[in-house]
Image (cartoon, rainbow, N blue to C red):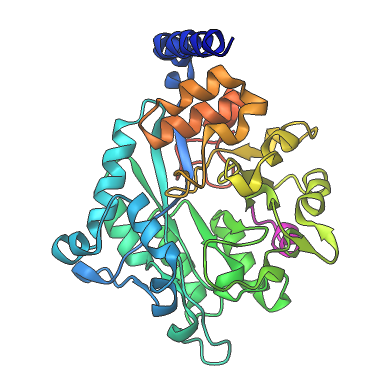
């Protein structure tokens, strides 16, 4: 009896291996769409004049080695070739993708002292300057400039004007590590300038686990009500999955906001991570939310062991999970996994509508 079971399993495995390319390619029309990944990170150690840094606390953490591995670089390579190597390899991987045509590369600003407007380097875990991202993305047709400006900078309004002129497609915040309270009314002039310039705000929502320290109370999605009311197009990253604010799940806190604010979007980045299992399918079943979704990967965090098709086999089925594991390109694997989980084709090619002249059109 035991050998019969083994033989049947071997036959099933052979069938799956044989059918892999046919299952992945069958009925696939996503190649015909212009797909932008709106949520891609890079990092640097200051080599080659990048101005980027990772503070010592973060470098001593186990996450640092994983991030370098997932970006397919080593410290020695960065020292020899400069931080630009990360962007060059990113562009190459995007170019190799069957589905993704462009990616928004995100700068990340630091923590700033509110009274002086100067950077607090000691408490800044991770910094990727705007000028560096702008210079690097200008070199590649498949990369777009995502700026990051902490509004407590002394020259924050001037910088908004500058990055808009440079073609930035959005402003990126991680409030919980940048020490920004989005609900602070002192930020109203900053929000009004963003709305005037048509710059969307891509803001992390929900608990933050990629860094050593985070003030998760600042990533409560309802703190984004102020910029929404002032006319800023807000993209709530990750649909506020994970974490609790005021005793309520962040995911439940954001859902009513889609009915209240037509200028609220969300991205589907990181929603296949093991700690967010089930949230994407739940969101797809909420009326009105799918129509506000845009595509994002959260590269390089769509890597194993954080992400695997096998974490979602209940929604994809064994056969599709197996086929998706055979896709080498990380973006293609991410696209096919999310499609297998029910994400409609139009989500992958949707544009947020605040800046149509900067991002190849919008819906």
Magenta-span inclusion, residue 30:
no
- Pick the front one: 299 or 254: 299
Q: Residue at x 51, y 37 (%)?
A: 308
Q: Residue furthest front?
A: 1
Q: Classify 229 as above or below 357.
A: below
Nearer to me, 235 or 77: 77
The quadrant in which residue 182 appears is bottom right
| Residue drawn at x 74%, y 65% as measured from the top left | 223
Q: Identify the residue at horizontal 29%, vertical 34% (top origin).
A: 95
Above or below for 321 versus 18: below
Residue at x-position 33% and y-position 70%: 52
- Quadrant where the N terminus lies? top right
- 269 lies left or right of 75: right
Residue 21: where, in percent of width, then height?
Answer: 40, 13
> In this rendering, would 176 be left or right of 217?
left
Name the one closer to the observer, 242 or 318.
318
């Amino acid at each position: 009896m035991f050998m019969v079971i083994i033989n049947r399993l071997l036959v099933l495995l052979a069938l799956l291996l044989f059918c892999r390319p046919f299952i992945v390619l069958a009925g696939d029309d996503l190649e015909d769409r212009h797909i932008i990944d709106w949520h891609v990170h890079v990092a640097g150690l200051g080599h080659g004049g990048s101005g980027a840094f990772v503070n010592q606390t973060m470098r001593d953490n186990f996450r640092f080695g994983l991030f370098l591995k997932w970006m397919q670089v080593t410290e020695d390579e960065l020292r020899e070739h400069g931080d630009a190597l990360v962007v060059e390899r990113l562009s190459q991987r995007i170019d190799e993708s069957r589905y993704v045509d462009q990616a928004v590369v995100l700068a990340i600003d630091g923590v700033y002292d509110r009274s002086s407007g100067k950077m607090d380097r000691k408490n800044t875990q991770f910094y990727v300057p705007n000028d560096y991202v702008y210079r690097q993305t200008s070199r590649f047709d498949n990369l777009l400039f995502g700026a990051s400006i902490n509004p407590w900078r002394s020259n924050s309004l001037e910088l908004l004007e500058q990055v808009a002129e440079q073609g930035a497609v959005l402003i990126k915040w991680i409030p919980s590590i940048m020490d920004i309270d989005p609900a602070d009314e002192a930020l109203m002039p900053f929000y009004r300038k963003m709305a005037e310039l048509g710059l969307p705000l891509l803001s992390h929502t929900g608990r933050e686990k990629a860094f050593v320290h985070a003030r998760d109370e600042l990533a409560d999605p309802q703190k984004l009500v102020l910029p929404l009311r002032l006319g800023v197009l807000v993209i709530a990253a990750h649909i506020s999955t994970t974490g609790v604010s005021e005793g309520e799940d962040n995911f439940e806190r954001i859902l009513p906001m889609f009915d209240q604010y037509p200028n609220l979007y969300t991205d589907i980045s990181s929603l296949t991570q093991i700690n967010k299992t089930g949230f994407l399918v739940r969101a797809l079943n909420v009326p009105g939310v799918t129509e506000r979704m845009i595509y994002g990967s959260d590269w390089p965090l769509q890597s194993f062991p954080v992400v695997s098709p096998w974490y979602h086999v209940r929604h994809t089925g064994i056969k599709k999970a197996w086929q998706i594991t055979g896709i080498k390109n990380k973006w293609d694997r991410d696209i096919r996994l999310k499609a297998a989980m029910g994400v409609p084709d139009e989500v992958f090619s949707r544009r947020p509508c605040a800046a149509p002249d900067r991002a190849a059109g919008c819906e």
